Amino acid sequence: MGGKEKGSGSLRLFVALDLPEGVRERIAAAVKKKAGLLPQARWVKEENLHLTLKFIGEYPEEKVERLEGILEKKALEHRPFTASLRGCGGFPSPGRARVIWVGMGKGEEEAASLASGLDSGLTRVGVKREARPFRGHLTLARLKNPMDCCSWLASLEEELSGLEEMDFQVREITLYRSVLSPQGPTYFPVRRFELGGKKVERD
Ligand code: 2AM
């Protein structure tokens, strides 16, 4: 897996759920039809669409192996599960949106439990605990200035009808490295961790 040259000191990392290509394509096709009506937005590239479970941020490269150990253990504590995506919205609110997102249908509870396990486990390797409660979402776009996106979101929601029926199995989580550039971020998978379903003893 790429993007991990030696000696860079620190890496910008996050943990995510990947989506099947069909789901990404379905969302990208809906967005393509509507994006022209929201020219202020910076859209996430189709290949970058993912569901963040835990943002780690800049992390010392020499400690990544220990961090991977925690991810491996935490992933094994969770059973694979069925998920789907549904609807859309805006953070902090649709009327003053800075982030436009697609929500989760099935599997949100499981994703939240996975995220919370990662959040507490990673404190042991120096990662800051998440201050906000987990909200399973897939970021579609970011807006520099908050905007009233209510009617735009309503029309995207129509375009996304049927998405909820596209169930998929979550069998693994991925540690990503994010490399920022003026052209936008590139995400490199560092390592994937299979979900296990075995109850692992806690220490
Ligand atoms: P989000 O888009 O799902 O909200 C990779 O940068 C991912 O990490 C992004 O998709 C973003 O999640 C999340 N992220 C980026 N910066 C963050 C920050 N400062 N705090 C929390 N999450 C962040």
Image (cartoon, rainbow, N blue to C red):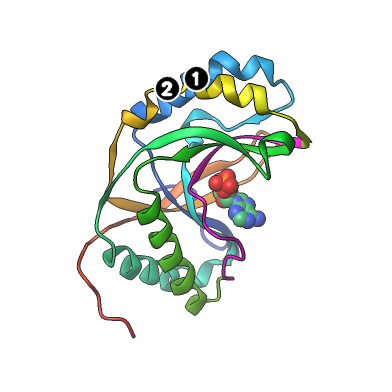
Is residue 4 toward the left or the right of residue 36 in the image?
A: left
Q: Which span is picked out in magenta? A: 128-144
User: Is 3 or 54 nearer to us in this picture?
Assistant: 54
Disc 1: which residue = 158
Q: Which mark is residue 161?
A: 2
Is residue 143 toward the left or the right of residue 2 in the image?
A: right
Residue 10, given in percent of the width and then of the height, sits at 60, 63
Q: Identity of the amino acid at label 1?
A: Glu
- The residue at the point 36 percent across, 31 percent down is 164
Mark 2 and mark 1: Cα distance apart in space: 5 Å
Q: Is residue 197 above or below residue 88?
A: below
Q: Is residue 119 above or below residue 32?
A: below
Q: Is residue 142 magenta?
A: yes
- The residue at the point 35 percent across, 43 percent down is 106
Can you see residue 191? no
Q: Is residue 127 magenta?
A: no
Query: Callout 1: few (<14), some (14-19), or many (20+) C-alpha neighbours within 10 Å?
Result: few
Answer whether labels 2 and 1 touch (C-beta < 8 Å).
Answer: yes
